[in-house]
Image: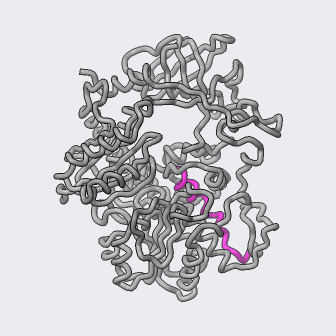
Amino acid sequence: MASLAVLARDRALSAVQLRRRESKGLPNGWSSSVHPVLQQIYAARGVLDPSQAEHRLTRMLSPQTLGGMTQAVDLLVEAIRGDWSILIAGDYDCDGATGTAVAVRGLRLLGAKQVSYAIPNRFIHGYGLSPALVASLQPTPQLIVTVDNGVASVAGVAAAKERGIRVIVTDHHLPGEQLPDVDAMVNPNLAGDAFPSKALAGVGVMFYLLLSLRARLYPGDTPDREDKETAIPCRTPQQSRPDLSSLLDLVALGTVADLVPLDFNNRVLVEAGLQRIRSGRGCAGITALVEAGKRSVATLCSSDLGFTVGPRLNAAGRLEDMRLGVECLLTDDVAQARSCAEQLSAINQERRELQASMVAEAEQMVVGLTDIDAVGVALYEPSWHAGIVGLVASKLKDRLHRPVIAFAPASEDDTDHLRGSARSIAGFHIRDALAAIDARQPGLIERFGGHAMAAGLSLKTSDYPRFKAAFDAIARELIDAERLQAVLYTDGELPPGAATLMLARQLRHAGPWGQAFPEPLFDNRFECASWKVMGERHLRLQLRDPRDGALHDAVMFNAYHGQPPPSPLRAAYELTINDWQGRESPRLLLRHIEPA
């Protein structure tokens, strides 16, 4: 019987539609040094003039319109001047870890002397500021500041208040029907919040809070003056004001790793952080993680953060304790940072092996289903690890092109409850779908939260069959059949002779590319002049452009299944740079191929 991998490949060759992005206007006023292809790529993403591609920090949105700032800053000023004990309550993913490091480093820069942090263990405390986490805090802090969580922590905040602890919530997740009774809350996604960008990651929200706090502690802003090194407007002479730009490498990492949309404001933050890392001014932990991933600090790009650095941090939160990740980001000792990075890499390797095993088991659950019966797919295996189910859901979502929720027992000691992680497709808001199920069948879902494309939930093991049916029913109700068809959007054909090293370099530095601002993807027909297998699963090819006969080096990862690639073929690909022994050359990174 065919495996899902074969089925997925067959579907990819026959069912994936390649559509070309439509230009959203005509390029205007670009310098002749900007390649015409890059101008068209910008236009397809709504960037129509050079100023929209200038990611200077002076163009960053002001913190003043972010709701809850006044109350949060008032309380933090009181805490700093009163020498309160402040505890940062973070989260066990990369956004939460970087946000925690930004909070601890930033508050110390701004004068707080008693700053500590706590990261929940997902198997002991659950998610966010839970009652279990609050109960574990010894000694009792005077103020808790959450990062990347808290908007749904009604019970946890109540538990803190019972112990006399003041609470500030900083979060970016969508709120539920009830908000916790906090002293202050900063979240751009609260109803009625006037902040123009709703795409800030948790680490970005914390960075904005620190900017507002600095403005209060160091008044006298003169907005027409600019620090030429950091491009952050100076409020007082540089030598007397803390340099919060030192935190931007952490902001960039958390923003990219959390897969929030890279709107203009987020691109400004990410680009500033990347520049800091490339110039050798990144924190010791990020530098060590980049080196552990065998990436170049000098040429680091956003995809390196997302696919190399971020997973190493996330692995600690998935399998063990994210405190190791936070300590890596907080230390200024190079040797300690490298030691942490080595441990995180080892944990990440364990995560990869466990993920491969679980994905293989998930594939076997749907073996032979050429047309998957369920529109909303729910999967559960008692032996699965709760920290890995999100990765399983993501892999299956990509292969089946329909929303997937993967479940595992809450812990080794609690098999009566399940924890699920959901991943969705475009047009199906997964958190809203869970809210609809909760409204129709109260009590079926114990807890849930998340975004449009990803969410988490918990329920009783005995209720899994009922939830599985409810999830499929809501997916059938809300998803049109055409949305179950995988679509890959490209930027069209590269003209003959355009696949040059010069254009590849411009594309690398034109980002940062990421969620909602995708990496340029081209679509051409080629003849396969030669090919060979690298390792066991990867392909290295030479492709001939039939228009001018030019040969192009190309690679495609995880693409070999025992059959030669088709020729002629149609390929969707990225134009990248192959850096081999110090020599750079253009290379096509194939994302999809099909017979031409």
Which sits in the foreground, 405 or 79?
Answer: 405
Answer whether residue 242 is visible to the viewer in this image.
yes
The answer to if 245 sits in the magenta stretch is yes
Image quarter where the N terminus lies is top left
Q: Position of residue 163 (x, y in %)?
A: 35, 84
* 483 is higher (above) or lower (below) than 153: above
Q: Quadrant of residue 321?
A: bottom left
Which sits in the foreground, 253 or 160?
Answer: 160
Q: Position of residue 121 (x, y in %)?
A: 33, 63
Which sits in the foreground, 439 or 299?
Answer: 439
Q: Residue furthest bottom?
A: 82
User: For the point 32% across and 56% down, which residue is it?
Assistant: 439
User: For the point 66% across and 14% down, which residue is it?
Assistant: 550
The answer to if 471 sits in the magenta stretch is no
Q: Position of residue 284 (x, y in %)?
A: 55, 59
* 430 is higher (above) or lower (below) than 542: below
Q: Is residue 507 left or right of residue 181?
A: right
Q: Which portion, as a residue range, is magenta?
A: 239-256
Which sits in the foreground, 38 or 278?
Answer: 38
Q: Is residue 50 left or right of residue 215?
A: right
Q: Quadrant of residue 157?
A: bottom left
The secondary structure that dominates the magenta segment is helix
Q: Is residue 366 left or right of residue 493?
A: left
User: For the point 48% across and 64% down, which residue is it?
Assistant: 171
* 9 is higher (above) or lower (below) than 464: above
